[in-house]
Image (tube, helix red, strand yellow):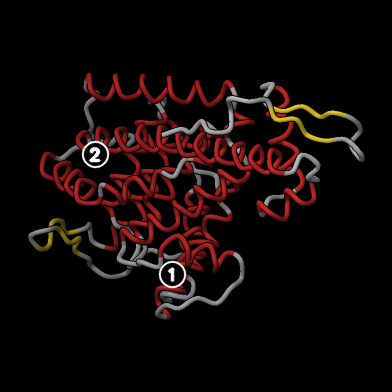
Amino acid sequence: MNYKPPYTITSKIVNLISQISEELTKIEIDEQRIITPNLRKINRIKTLAGTLEIEGNFLGEEKITSILDGKTVLGTYREITEAKGAIEAYKEFENYNPKTLTDMLKAHQILMKDMITTAGSFRSINVGVGGKDGVAHIAPPPNQVPKLMQDLFDWLSTTDEHPLITSSVFHYEFEFIHPFSDGNGRIGRLWQSVIMHSWKKAFIAIPTESIIRDHQEEYYQAIENSSSIGESTPFIEFMLEVILESIQSSVTSNQKSSHKSDQKVLELMKKNSKITIKELMQQLSMSESGIKKVIKKLKVENRVQRVGSLKDGRWEVLENYIDREIY
């Protein structure tokens, strides 16, 4: 008989899935404008900082950005090695097949290759999972891990349950099995995002891990609550709340960022009507394509117009837009 993880579909779960689907539909209607390369980069950095901070690594977004840019940063050897491993593991995000155990082992090998000698392999020792009052859970013995993980992936590959539910169930069951000697939390969070991305591509730019970090105590409590009743229902409900919040915060953040870029371009054009695209690039530290995209948007919205030729003309900023702000 095929293994099926225990959980119950509650009215709260149904309602949360409905809300998440509505939010995703809003994104998909205008996905190209909303999910910009800049948003993907910003949210990837938030994701990395979030998943590392949950494990006690507080390098933060600024230093992770510097590492991504090839710069030297201050930090302990472990902090920097962990960050580099996470960066490399998430670089492969879009290439992982969520239903393939070998891909997860590959992700763990990338994540932990400079941290432990057993990177990419299941643990060979007994482990206990800590809770706020000590050891909250004794993981299954190591000789059971390969079969338990294969059963879990077999279920993932054959279930017709909603992907938001399967990703949350998988995340909980993975943490229950605790298949690796280290890195279980990071891989569990990564794999839930990979599963959701295989369902909706918009999840490439939704930093679920950073929202989990903001609710870290509730995250561990949801795991403990599920363990105490023998099914993942409390954890599913918690994760769906996190996913909804992460989608809403991601879109709002991008709207604010986009608005600020619009305002800065308008302000510079108002100060110097003959400012060039190259000068805008230099003053705002933006790419040529980024500046041109903003200008195109401002023209479509009738907020700016070009008077005369590109070479000898000038910008005319239409009034009543400069001082508007999004809060």
Along the line of sight, the residue nearer the viewer: 199 or 84: 84
Q: Amino acid at mark 2?
A: Phe
Along the line of sight, the residue nearer the viewer: 145 or 21: 21
Q: Secondary structure at mark 1?
A: helix
Q: Which mark sits nearer the N-terminus, 2 or 1?
A: 1
Circle 1 is placed at which residue position? Answer: 82
- What x and y, as percent, mark residue 8? 22, 27
Placement of the N terminus among the 4 image quadrants? top left
- What x and y, as percent, mark residue 33? 62, 31
Circle 2 is placed at which residue position? Answer: 235
Residue 287 bears which disc, if any?
none
| Marks 2, 1: nearer the viewer | 1
Left or right side of 213 for 65:
right
* Contact? badges 2 and 1 (CB < 8 Å): no
Q: Residues within 10 Å of mark 2 (few under 14, many from 20)?
A: many
Q: Secondary structure at mark 2?
A: helix
The residue at the point 77 percent across, 39 percent down is 273
Q: Amino acid at mark 1?
A: Glu
| Real-space CA distance between mark 2 and mark 1, rounded to the nearest whole angstrom | 26 Å
Give residue 270's quadrant in the image. top right
Q: Residues within 10 Å of mark 1 (few under 14, many from 20)?
A: many
The residue at the point 69 percent across, 43 percent down is 271
Q: Is residue 118 above or below residue 272?
A: below
